[in-house]
Image (cartoon, rainbow, N blue to C red):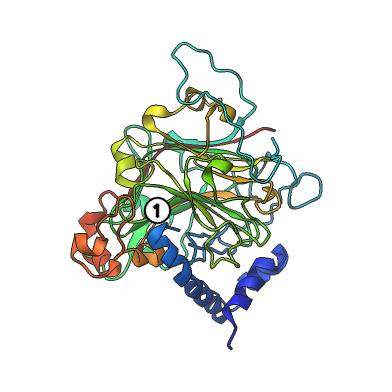
Amino acid sequence: MLIQIPFVLALLSNVAPSDANLFARGSDSLRRVHHHAAKRSASFARDLRTTFGSIFVEQNSDTNKLGSARVYCVSSPSNNGTSLTNGTSPIPSSPATFAPTPSATGSQSNGTSARPTSSASGASPSGTSIPSSPWKVVQSFQGNSFFTGWDFFTGGDPTNGQVTYVDQSTAQKAGLVSINSAGNAIMRVETTAQVATTRQSVRITTSKTYTGGLVIMDSVHMPTGCGTWPAFWSNGPNWPAGGEIDIVEGVNDYTNNQATIHTNPGCTIPTSNANQLGVTGTLVGGTNCAAAQTGNQGCGVRASQTNSFGAAFNNNGGGVYAMQWDNSGISIFFFPRNSVPSDITNSAPQPDSWGQPMAFWPSSGCDPFKFFYQHSAIFDTTLCGDWASSAWTGSGIPGQEQSCAQRTGVSTCEEFIRNNGAAFNEAYWEVKSVKIYQTS
């Protein structure tokens, strides 16, 4: 059966959530058509990635991610029948709702105004008391119980990566997940010298969902090196209807993080001028954030800090990422290890004191509670795949001034990952904590 690609993407992006679930659960042949559509649209996004970086996702009933073409899109977990309600609407109009799955134990005034900022940033002077915060922890992942409250995804990699995602028991036995002596969570990829096709890896998704809130992730180390493609992100149901927020993402040897949103049609940003938006990053791609209308490119922002991703991030002791989702829009902040505000370390966050965010998508052009809802936070590390493979021969990106093909002497990403297990000794997450806050 022949189906035009734009028609499939438009259909997926405009169906109601209930219809989307039926569509997503169709036959294998229909799923292959969708994958083909994603791969076709990847050709455009791939060109942008070579200069900027970015890709796609979908969802199924097992917190699946079926995507490939985004300026990195990933798929949303299933809501498992749990609705986040503020009244009777399935899409709340106000922030701060948090819902468990059944099995789980300021407004923007105009199109170009910048996010309100404060002169205060960085750590507070020692001895200074921390004022109370309206943001209260609703879930905290850290220490020996870090992996409690996460589901281990075991489906095929939706971005065509050369990995096999394994369950928690398998990951523990293989040494892919652990809590180290510092009390930090470790998530690795397999480093066996040679493999026939794929390497084992880990992808975890929070069992609870949230609509609106403040997500703060403190990491000491993230996966890096040629062939790697790590991400920390969140997704809603029926992608792209529930929206996607990529907080941390990049490939290979990149040193500058890229944050991106992907939505249904109707979400835009008012300008590509970073100064007018009040962000420290650089906008990449366009101002239309609709996945179906942009070849899954979405609206991306690249960090200006060269220690915000990869080896440079790790060499600096890591840092903290914060995603704020409220009535003003969606913002992402990055703080290198030596600049983490004391209100964050004291679990009393004061976002208004943090200065300009790295990225900001204002509510004036994109209603944050219409285009985003019922999100789960996700960590994953894939190898090669649509983005890292396409960037294998690319150069000129911060951190990848020389292509991976030149640096390794191997012509393809897939060949490299199969025969060089030791090259992935640095392909691991070391996470101190993830905390999810809400105001009510």
Q: Which residue is mark 1?
A: 250
Which residue ends up furthest to the bottom in the rendered image? 1
- The answer to whether one can see residue 44 in this image is yes
Q: Quadrant of the N terminus?
A: bottom right
Across and down, in percent, residue 400 comes to 29, 54
Task: Indicate whether 169 appears above or below 132.
Answer: below
Would residue 109 appear left or right of 341 to someone viewing this image? right
- Residue 202 location, quadrant: bottom left
Task: Indicate whether 36 appears above or below 312.
Answer: below
Three-letter residue code for mark 1: Gly
Would residue 123 appear left or right of 418 to someone viewing this image? right
Would residue 61 appear left or right of 303 to someone viewing this image? right
Across and down, in percent, residue 287 comes to 58, 56
Across and down, in percent, residue 411 comes to 23, 70
At x 56%, y 25%, the residue is 348
Describe the element under mark 1 as helix, strand or loop.
loop
> How many badges with numbers are in the image?
1
Q: Quadrant of the C terminus?
A: top right
